[in-house]
Image (cartoon, rainbow, N blue to C red):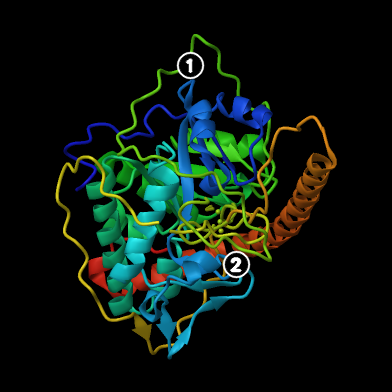
Amino acid sequence: MSKTGAQTMNPLDGVKNYQVYYGHPNETIIKDMQNYDLVIIEPLHYTKAQVEQIKSRGTKVLGYISVMEVATWNTGLMSKLQSGDFFTRNGQRVHYSEWDSYLTNIASPHFQGLLLTEIQNQVIAKGIDGVFMDTVGDIDNEHLNNPTVLKQQRDGLVNFLKEARARYGNIAMVQNWGFDTLETSTAPYVDGIMWESFNADTIKSDAWSQNMIKKLQAVDTKHSVKTLTISTRQSAESHKLAADSKFIHFHEADAYVNWNAGLVTRTKDTAPTPAPVVVAPTTETSTATKPVAAKPVTETSTAPKPVAAKPATEAPTAPKPVATKPATETPTAPKSVATKPATETSTAPKPVATKPATETSTAPKPTTAPTKPAASTSTTTKPVEQKDSKQAESKQKTEKELKKDKKKAKKHAKKHAAKHAKFVKHEKAKGNMCAKAKHKTAGFLNFFKF
């Protein structure tokens, strides 16, 4: 089911501000989230009750999933993957050492099913309004030089999006990067796209970026696809440039692992009326604690990665946001068996089983990686009055886990900063690569390359 037709409005209409946060919530953070029009979170860290609290004043919530990568820490998901779910080149899986993750084959019907299950268990069941799909940019980064594989991966992504809409209705769907894939394939099925590293000093002086702004504005006019931008420097200038371009902007300097409090204030009079969520309600069976890096989640769907050159880590697989990867490379535990929603507004064609994607050419590896949320090891809990030695021991254990989380977050922030530096240098290279491709085939003159 296309988002057009039954859906008359983009769920991102009216969103003027947002924030990306992949850390654990607490009461103060949840209360401050209510001041935003939109927040993007790592759903593994939240209960259904906490999501309802965030949404109580009209805030929309998107849950992170990683579409094109899966991290090794997520043993629950890794154990479910079949050989055809990994993308192979010259017979070898494509591994990203920085995040210890593997490139996936979105054309695999089995892998699509795992992602759909993740959406059911971590998004639909918790009352979250939609999904933020990290690592979509890997399609353009990895396969641009192989048209056959490029088309196969894009078709696979479209099949996944169609099935997600057929099962879960008009949930909000935002992809991270993948500009060319957006224009050629996914624009009719998504509501937004994220552009990380939207820094005014680079964007203003770069011809590729200026052209991309026009392209995204045209896509919005035709398909109603909103652009969410993120800057890591020149906050005021970047905000103005985004506003002038009719984009929705957020300035991030902490790799999505620290909540930036007090940036937005919403008064009672201006608070929007919460919009009904068109999803199939599901009963949440448990609130499992978060896995420790050494002990990754064993069940990716019941217990519940994006960073701005891409957000902090992967979903159904694990988050990087244009969003890229947050504190300890923690792709969202992907994608418990998805239950069929109450109603289906249309019947989208089911993906047809295909042979595992393989590539014989040596395509260049991407210089940037999408964001991934940090793999947290525990949930923030309210302090309880100590009544016996067992309670004291439990509290001490929680404090140790929180310290370990902080250490991981700092490590991730450091990696994220390095990634941003490389990304800025890569922007012009992408523009040049795009220009070459356009001149090679007249038929692609209307397309833009990532």
Helix, strand or loop at label 1? It is: loop
Q: Is residue 312 above or below residue 262?
A: below
Q: Which mark is residue 338?
A: none
Residue under circle 2? 73
Task: State left or right for residue 145 relative to residue 380.
Answer: left
CA distance separating discs 1 and 2: 40 Å
Which residue occupies 60% across, 58% down? 325
Kind of residue sitting beneath label 1: Ala
Residue under circle 1? 271
Q: Nearer the viewer, residue 281 or 362?
A: 281
Residue 353 in the image, given as x and y percentages of width and height: 23, 74
Kind of residue sitting beneath label 2: Trp
Mark 1 residue crowding within 10 angstroms, few (<14) / some (14–19) / many (20+) = some
Which residue occupies 45% across, 54% down? 301
Task: State left or right for residue 433 relative to residue 307.
Answer: left
Task: State left or right for residue 324 relative to residue 207.
Answer: right
Residue 256 in the image, given as x and y percentages of width and height: 64, 47
Q: Nearer the viewer, residue 146 or 403?
A: 403
Q: Is residue 393 above or below residue 74?
A: above
Which residue occupies 31% across, 38% down? 279
Of mark 1 and mark 2, the one earlier in the sequence is 2
Question: Mark 1, mark 2: which one is toward the viewer?
Answer: 2
Q: Is there CB contact under 8 Å for labels 1 and 2?
A: no
Q: Is residue 317 above or below residue 240?
A: below
Residue 377 in the image, given as x and y percentages of width and height: 67, 54
Outermost residue toward the top in this view: 269
- Name the image quarter holding the C terminus: bottom left
Q: Nearer the viewer, residue 69 or 285?
A: 285
